[in-house]
Image (spheres, rainbow, N blue to C red):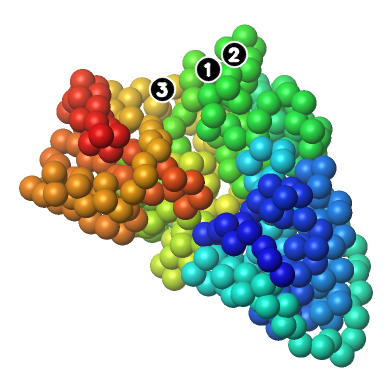
Amino acid sequence: MQVNPSIFKAYDIRGIYPTDLNEPVAYLIGRAFVTFLGAEQVVVGRDMRTSGPSLFAEVTRGITDQGADVVDIGMVSTDQYYYACTQLGLPGMMVTASHNPKAYNGFKMVKQMPYLLSGDAGIQDLRRLVESEEFPTASRKGSITAHDFQEQFVNEVLSLIDVSAIKPLKVVVDTGNGMVGPILQEVYKHLPVQLIGLYLDPDGTLPNHGLDPLQPENRAELQQRVKDEGAAIGFAFDGDGDRFFAIDDRGDFISGDFLTAIMGQYLLEKHPGAKVLYDVRASWAVPDLIKADGGIPLMERVGHAFIKRRMANEDAVFAGEVTGHYYFKSFNYADSGIIPSLYILEMLSKRGVQMSDLLKTLEAKYFISGEINSTVADPKAKMQELAARYSDAEQHTMDGISVNYPTWHFNVRASNTEPLMRLNLESIASHEEMEQRRDEVLAIIRS
């Protein structure tokens, strides 16, 4: 079948419905998934997107026609899906396009937790199977059985913290009509917090705002509400709930690298001397704080398939990516939105501090640009140009190009999905140096 090859991405399958990804394609992907893995049973869940029910119906028809049984876990967040795959020890497919706009849909595919199918491990094999439509004849037709993991999941995530330590903090939460609202309310029922919820009902028409809290317009209302309510903290989640974001008591957005550093330190109190992973874009605050607390910081390339694999291999206790993915050994090395929210509530309760107090010490020393995107025709040529321009610096190419000087550093990498180059830069000398170097590197990228 002729399928747009661009839907087969680095970490998942994703495209616009129904032009790039539709029911006939979903059916073939279901058959290809069973064929490639030799699966006998497959966990399947979906998010709230309006194209979800029909894509779910067709992908599960493909799975059962290829002879495998389906465990239907219903409409769930992605961390609930990872939990179900872990509990059953089965491969899985989640019908979701994560934080993409409502026109998109896709599949996140588990081989066996914590390992996912990715571009270099399975996704291109699925593409070839879908294009050839060469599937072995199945000896039987599979069945579909419903299974509800909600109660087990709630108990599991609550077991990771000391619920009795939580103080009656005021918390504002925006789930953006994505998948986190229902499960978050079930978890938070057991906590003494005062919960103020925004857009907790799943709604694939997205009547209020987009699903990516990294976009300032999607979190503006939450930031204002935290200030208006005098809340201790604000939490935001992306559409399928595998990414997590926080707003401090000043109403300010907390960068993912600062959150990684703070949470990493907190988890080291529970697990002294443990390994903590961070991605190549992160602030030096992460390795500095982890080392200062006796932990072992390890850098890894961007992307959940790589992070989970490395965490499992290294037996790391925690990992954070600047884009809001947080991974926990206690959750089978998977990422979750709910779990970091619980650890932060526990930390604020036990320490009796405000989030802004913890951040002020970092903000006084680490001056970060945040991620800046530029449209570039030939990313490879630009990388070579940057390498030559900064040839007197320490460099590495784990993911894109990373350039380190004594007081400042940057990473530039090409997007996996768009013709973009992404810059993250930091100075530990001054805000002025950060701005000056940021503009200097951007001028090269955009020339």
Instruction: Report if the CB atoms under discs 2 and 1 are less than 8 Å apart.
Output: yes
SS assignment at label 2? helix
| Quadrant assignment for the N terminus | bottom right
Q: For residue 26, which quarter of the picture? A: bottom right
Label number found at residue 224:
2
Query: Three-letter amino acid code at disc 3?
Result: Asp
Q: CA distance from mark 1 to mark 3?
A: 13 Å
Q: Which-is-in-front pick, marks 3 and 2?
A: 2
Residue at image location 79% in from the left, 33% down from the top: 205
SS assignment at label 1? loop
446 vs 162, left or right, is left
Which one is earlier in the sequence, the residue at label 1 or at label 3? 1
Q: Nearer the viewer, residue 70 or 289?
A: 70
Q: Position of residue 185 (x, y in %)?
A: 78, 36
Q: CA distance from mark 2 to mark 1?
A: 6 Å
Q: Nearer the viewer, residue 18 or 108?
A: 18
According to the picture, the residue beneath numbered tag 3 turns out to be: 357
Residue at image location 76% in from the left, 49% down from the top: 18
Query: Three-letter amino acid code at disc 1?
Result: Gly
Identity of the residue furthest to the left in this view: 392
Label number found at residue 251:
1
Instruction: Report if the CB atoms under discs 3 and 2 are less than 8 Å apart.
Output: no
| Quadrant assignment for the C terminus | top left
Query: Three-letter amino acid code at disc 2?
Result: Gln
Identity of the residue furthest to the top in this view: 228
Asked if one can make out residue 260 in the rendered structure from this viewpoint, the answer is no
**185 to 120, vertically: above or below:** above
Q: For residue 171, which quarter of the picture? A: top right
Q: Position of residue 332 (x, y in %)?
A: 59, 63
Q: Residues within 10 Å of mark 3 (few under 14, many from 20)?
A: few
Which one is earlier in the sequence, the residue at label 3 or at label 2? 2
